Image: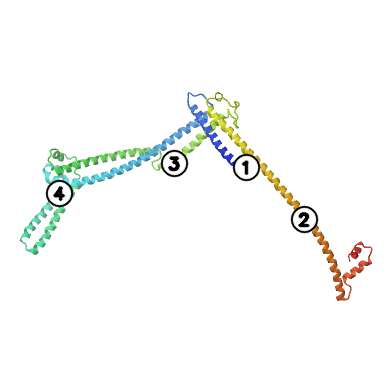
Amino acid sequence: MNKSNNTIPVLLKELKDLESKLTEAYKQLGNKLIKDTADPAAEANGVSQENFLQWQRLHDERKFCTESVLDIKNNSTRLSELDNFKKQVKDRLVDTKKETEKLKGDFLLKLYKDFLPHCGNLFDSLSAEIRTEEAKMQETMEKIEALNSEKKEANFFLKIGISGKISSNELKVKNSEKKIKNIFTKSDIDICNSQEVKALYDEDKLFPDLKKNYEEILKLCTDLSDSENRLKMIDEEAGFVTKKLADAGADKNSKKRIDNFTNRVKEIDEKIELILESTGLKYTENFYSAEGDSALGENPSDEALGKYADYLKKAGKYLKEINKVKCHIEFCEVMQKIKAEENQIQNLNRTIKNCENSIKEAEKKISSSETAIKNSEVKIADLKEYAAGLEEKFSGKPSEESRSSGQEEVQPDSEDNQTVSEEE
């Protein structure tokens, strides 16, 4: 197998790597040139104003896009965090309200029973409803008392019936107590801000268990207030963050907006890279040919190349190496063509040889065929003579062959007849 068949793929890969390195070298040089152009204190370096302005516009747009993506991501994340915080605070608020209501009913019921004279104003709004239930309860208790008196005088069987009535009325009393407690629980009485309750507490008039309940309620009220304030703060921040997302066009579909910015950044990067590569290439052409030969002579000094010497030497080195690899590839391709022509010649020589052998074989077949023809002609003549003799025997007449033979003997001057006679 031709070595070039294996060498060319390796060289093509090497060429691709070198071209990538050369492109990167141009970009690095172009980036340095443009950044120096942006510096008012830097010397002119030949970068066109058009390229510089285009690069500046793209650079500014890219910065805006990347900052927008970052803002959208941060604000979307913050909005999710606020939603979670809000849910947690709401859950805590619901639990606190339930616990407060539970303590509230017991506390107000005890306060109503033991300290009503000191907190009259606190229960004004509920007095009518509570008194209605209390009247029912008082009436029922009087019935119970009457039934108990009746029970004492009754016989055994009557006592059983009366006991059932007493239990039924006692259940009504308990239900009335529950209703009164429920009225206190569902009421809008503000225990925490009640000056009457506060006065009883400050004067240490509340019973220990009532005092403890009051302190627990105060703590729960503080928790409720804190949670409500926290919800308000979360809503305010969420509104601010949502507005920022709306300003960025990402309030409805932040992912789609991020994708738009990201795709635009990719487009900008491609355009910037083309500008940088083009700028670096044009500057390098002032110092190196496409083959990597220096316009300043072999091995130019850094001073001769100027402030961008390192960038230029790197580009020149890659140009030289690329040219060598291209020449090597072309050499291998020429060798492949030569090998192909050599193979063609070998194939044609084989064809010629095969044709020559075929000709010899054909000549042999021709000679053999000619001999076979002569032998067949002799056999035909002999068979005709024999057939003529057989004809005379079964017909009694000279055969056509005999007559023909006789006629031929009459004409001795004919060379053909003489030949036939001789053959016979």
Question: For this view, does 36 lie left or right of residue 226?
Answer: right
Location of mark 3 (residue): 259
> Going from the N terminus, do you reach mark 1 or mark 3 first?
1
CA distance for labels 1 and 4 = 110 Å
Please report the residue visible at 11 percent of the width from the left and 55 percent of the height from the top. Answer: 140
Kind of residue indicated by mark 2: Ala
Quadrant of the frame with the C terminus:
bottom right
User: In x, y percent, where is residue 71?
Assistant: 39, 37
> Going from the N terminus, do you reach mark 4 or mark 3 first?
4
**Secondary structure state at the residue bearing disc 3:** helix
Kind of residue indicated by mark 3: Asp
CA distance for labels 4 and 3 = 65 Å
Please report the residue visible at 37 percent of the width from the left and 40 percent of the height from the top. Answer: 77
Task: Tell us which disc is closer to us: 2 or 1.
Answer: 1
> Going from the N terminus, do you reach mark 3 or mark 2 first?
3
Quadrant of the frame with the N terminus:
top right
Location of mark 1 (residue): 3
User: In x, y percent, where is residue 28?
Assistant: 51, 31
In this rendering, is residue 202 above or below 165?
above
Task: Tell us which disc is closer to us: 4 or 3.
Answer: 3
Question: For this view, does 149 lie left or right of residue 42?
Answer: left
Task: Tell us which disc is closer to us: 2 or 4.
Answer: 2
Is residue 86 in sight in this rendering? yes
CA distance for labels 2 and 1 = 43 Å
**Secondary structure state at the residue bearing disc 4:** helix
Q: Residues within 10 Å of mark 1 (few under 14, many from 20)?
A: few
Which label belongs to residue 117? none
Location of mark 2 (residue): 362
> Going from the N terminus, do you reach mark 2 or mark 4 first?
4
> Going from the N terminus, do you reach mark 2 or mark 1 first?
1
CA distance for labels 3 and 2 = 80 Å
